[in-house]
Image (cartoon, rainbow, N blue to C red):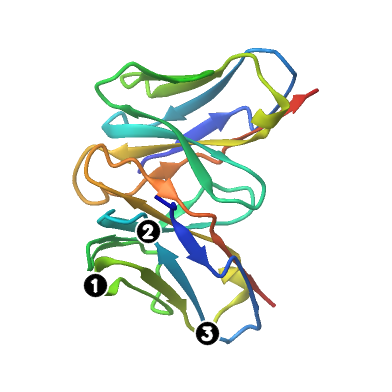
């Protein structure tokens, strides 16, 4: 059974700092990995999707990397802003077979950017 | 493209009552998913539709839960005889083809008293 872990559970940084969020997964047979942002009481906003054949994806100040063989992904946020404060979730999709349309999520990292 | 729309955003009900949530996916997205999220946890998969066919169901989806997607457009998730343990955020997502990037709605929060 796939397990996804996100460390740390919470992170507080001063505005302007660069930061890295971590995601690890136990089964490397994944189809893709997706990073989401969730504001309190809201739904999920897709940030980046990395296919299993890719090493990284970039969107603006965000860069996500994937090391499939070691079961790790990182989300790098450059020049953090107070508006980046949210919970960041990663989710993996299995490569094939039953359940291949199910995402398995981590519990998220709650980020606070202090002005 | 107006995004995934869910209704109602918040439902408060008494234990034993039935509730129904509606999800309107992004137009022309043929795949639709329901997830459930409790406080402090990541979302958990409930069920998946491709067009009008329900192709996957989680063991979390007890016989009190039923989901439909008539005509392959909007979907409904009904919970019968609600229990306090059903209190959660119910999230709907949709996707189109490859690479199957999911787009979520704002969710429907259920509170069972």
Q: Chain of mark 1?
A: B
Location of mark 3 (residue): B18
Against A11, residue B37 (above or below) is below
Q: Nearer the viewer, mark 3 or mark 2?
A: 2
Q: Which comes sooner in the sequence, label 1 or label 2? A: 2
Front-most of residues B82 and A63: A63
Q: Looking at the picture, do discs 1 and 3 lie on one chain? A: yes
Give the secondary structure at mark 1.
helix
Q: Which comes sooner in the sequence, label 1 or label 3? A: 3
Q: Looking at the picture, do discs 1 and 2 lie on one chain? A: yes
Question: Looking at the picture, how far across and down is residue A73, in whole percent?
Answer: 43, 22
Location of mark 2 (residue): B25
Question: Looking at the picture, how far across and down is residue B46, in whole percent?
Answer: 39, 61
Front-most of residues A50 and A81: A81
Location of mark 1 (residue): B71
Which residue is pictured at 19% across the width and 46% down the height? A97
Q: Are marks 1 and 3 in contact (CB under 8 Å)?
A: no
């Amino acid at each position: 059974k796939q397990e996804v872990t996100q460390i740390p559970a919470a992170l507080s940084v001063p505005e302007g700092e660069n930061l890295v969020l971590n995601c690890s997964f136990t089964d490397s047979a994944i189809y893709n990995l997706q990073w989401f942002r969730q504001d309190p009481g809201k739904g999920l906003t897709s940030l980046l999707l990395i296919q299993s054949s890719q090493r990284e994806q970039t969107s603006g100040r965000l860069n996500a990397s994937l090391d499939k063989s070691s079961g790790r992904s990182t989300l790098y946020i450059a020049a953090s802003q107070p508006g980046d404060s949210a919970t960041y979730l990663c989710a993996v999709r299995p490569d094939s077979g039953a359940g291949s349309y199910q995402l398995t999520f981590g519990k998220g990292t709650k980020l606070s950017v202090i002005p | 493209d107006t995004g995934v729309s869910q209704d109602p955003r918040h439902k408060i009900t008494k234990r034993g009552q039935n509730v129904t949530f509606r999800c309107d996916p992004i137009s022309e997205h043929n795949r639709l998913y329901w997830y459930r999220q409790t406080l402090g946890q990541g979302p958990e998969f409930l069920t998946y539709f491709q067009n009008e066919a329900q192709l996957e169901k989680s063991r979390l989806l007890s016989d009190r839960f039923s989901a439909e997607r008539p005509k392959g457009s909007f979907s409904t998730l009904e919970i019968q005889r609600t229990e306090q343990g059903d209190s959660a955020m119910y999230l709907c997502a949709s996707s189109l083809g490859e690479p199957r990037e999911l787009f979520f709605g704002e969710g429907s929060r259920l509170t069972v008293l």
